[in-house]
Image (tube, grey):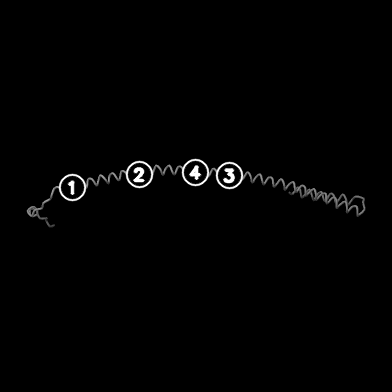
Amino acid sequence: MGRIFTLVIGGIAGAIGGLLFAPRTGKETREQIKSRIDETMEGSFERYGEQSGKLLEMATERGQMLRVKIEDAREQMVSSVDNVADKVREKMGVEAEKAEEAVEVVEEKIEAAKEEVEAVESVELAEPVETSEASVEEAPPEEEK
């Protein structure tokens, strides 16, 4: 941008200097200065248009490249999240199976304990326990300390 500005200023200064030292009338010199300024301005606008077109094209290309990079990064992130989710689901399945097995073992032990309690209760009910006064009287008294 600085080179273009310097070129324009140099062109204008050169044109003015050349016209001022030319052997012409004032009116001819003014018309020639005006035409040179117009030519220089047109050339500057053309160059500005070309440069702004190039800048716009570069910005568009970079924007497209950025979109592609963002899309790639998004796809990688989605893939990573899916992989982690699959691993978590797999672990949860294994842990759920272990929990079910543990519950089955506990239920079996509870059932076995119930059966033992029922067996003990049925034995106790089958054998009546008699307490006689004699057996209570024969018991030695406890010593006081």
Residue type of the residue flagged with mark 3: Glu
Disc 3, SS: helix
Give the mark nearest the N terminus, 3 or 1.
3
Give the Cα distance between marks 2 and 1. 33 Å
Judge depth for marks 1 and 4 and give the one in front. Answer: 1
**Which of these two is toward me, 83 or 11?**
83
Residue type for callout 4:
Asp
- Looking at the image, tell me whether mark 1 or mark 4 is earlier in sequence order: 4
Residue bearing the label numbered 1: 122
Secondary structure beneath label 1: helix
Q: Residue at x 88, y 53 (%)?
A: 31
Q: Is residue 139 visible?
A: no
For disc 2, the neighbor class at 10 Å (few under 14, some 14 to 19, many from 20) is: few
Determine which residue is flagged by label 2.
100
Q: Secondary structure at mark 4?
A: helix
| C-alpha span from label 3 to label 1 | 75 Å
Residue 58: % across, % down: 68, 45
Residue bearing the label numbered 4 = 82
Q: How many marks?
A: 4
Residue plotted at (18% across, 47% down): 122
Q: Position of residue 137 (x, y in %)?
A: 7, 55
Measured in 3D between alpha carbons, the distance from the residue under mark 1 to the one under mark 4, in whole angstroms, is 59 Å
Whether residue 25 is visible here, answered yes or no, is yes
Q: Which residue is mark 3?
A: 71
The three-letter amino acid code for the residue at tag 1 is Ser
Q: CA distance from mark 4 to mark 3?
A: 16 Å
Q: Residue 72 in the image: x percent, y percent?
A: 57, 43
